[in-house]
Every structure is written in structure tokens, then in C-alpha cells.
Image (spheres, grey):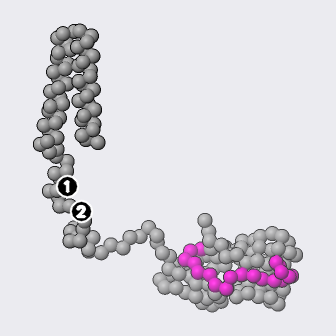
Amino acid sequence: MTPVLLVELNRGALHDVEAPSEFAIGEPFSVELRNHGESVHVHVRADEALSAVARIDTDGNLFVERETTQSVPVDVEDVGSPVTGTLEISTGYGAERRTIEVTVEPDGDDDAVDVDETLSRPPEPDADSDSPPLADRLSLGVPSRRTVALLAVGAAAIVVAAAVAATVRSPTVLIGAGVVVGAVLVALVAVFA
């Protein structure tokens, strides 16, 4: 979307010009002439410093109908360093005028990334870091002997209960095996939760 420099015309009185005192830009923009009253002739002119880097895409003499808005495109060249000049908006054949200080800035490419040689080296470990050493972090993923023993006893109890239930085939033994399996699962959840 093209940036806009808004200029209000005839808002307070006939030939009244309201605009910001300064405007900074790094790309083409549009001067938007918003007329709040009667039709008016408007002259838009850049001084020598501004016209060296910006070009107004009209002859500069415009007729703005009552209660309308007219846009004046301004093309801006790429600059290496900021260039400041003035843009003059006048009405009433020069009786009323507003001067806007316009600064054309170098186009800041937002996608550009500054890279220096420090990015080619791996980061040095921070001595003040609160993270544990690598050996401690790896040991967190390995279960302890107590955990392995508890899992082995739980698995053995489930296997024995299932084998007894499959061998005897009695409803009472089947219910007992289910109670054993349930108790082992509840105990494991309680230990690891």
C-alpha cells in the first residue's frame, strides 16, 4: 500500500490548507488532497533539494472539486543518505500556503540481515548458565535401578495372573487375576505420577 501525506483543504475557511509540518519517507508516496468545502485550485511544488530526488507526477496545478479527494503521486528515487527539502501546497493563487519539510530516507530493506564473522563460530558455553551438564541431562532419560525392578515385578505379576487365569478357567480366578492386574497398574501410576 502506498504511503499517504494527507492535506486537508477548506476545512476551517475557504482556501485553508492544513498539513503536517514534516514528513519522512523512503519510497514513492501520494499527496492526498481532501477538500471539505468549495472547489479550489491547488498548486503542489517541490523545492530544488526535494525535486532532485522526488518527482511529482502531475503538472502541479490541480483543480479539486468540492467535497472530493484527489491523489497526487510522488515518485521517489533511492538515496544513499537522507535528503531534506520542502513541498509547498498553495491555494487561492498563492494567498494561502503550507510548507511541509519532506525527508527522503534510504530505503531500509526490512528483509536484509547483517551478517558478520562471529556467526561462523559456534557459541561459547555460558559459565553462568543454569542448565545442567550434558551427562546430567542424559541421565534423566535413563530409568533408575529401582524403577526397572518395580517394572519387572509388575510385569511378572501380570504374566503370572494371566497364566493362572488361562490355565484354571474359573470365573473366580479370572476376577482375581483382573484385580491383580488392576492393582499393579494403579501402583505403577501412583509411583510414576
Q: Which residues are magenta?
A: 10-28
Query: Can residue 13 be found in the magenta stretch?
Result: yes
Q: List x then y, in percent, for residue 78.
A: 52, 78
User: What residue lies at 46% left-to-right and 72% top-to-bottom?
Assistant: 109
Identify the disc placed on residue 137.
1
User: What residue lies at 19% left-to-right and 24% top-to-bottom?
Assistant: 158
Against 18, is 134 above or below? above
User: What residue lies at 23% left-to-right and 19% top-to-bottom?
Assistant: 177
Q: For residue 137, what is the image quadrant? A: bottom left
Identify the disc placed on residue 131.
2
Q: For residue 134, what is the image quadrant? A: bottom left
Under circle 1, the secondary element is: helix
**Amino acid marked by disc 2:** Ser
Q: What main secondary structure does the magenta stretch of the protein show?
A: loop
Q: List x then y, in percent, for residue 88.
A: 71, 86
Of residues 37 and 130, the one nearer the viewer is: 130
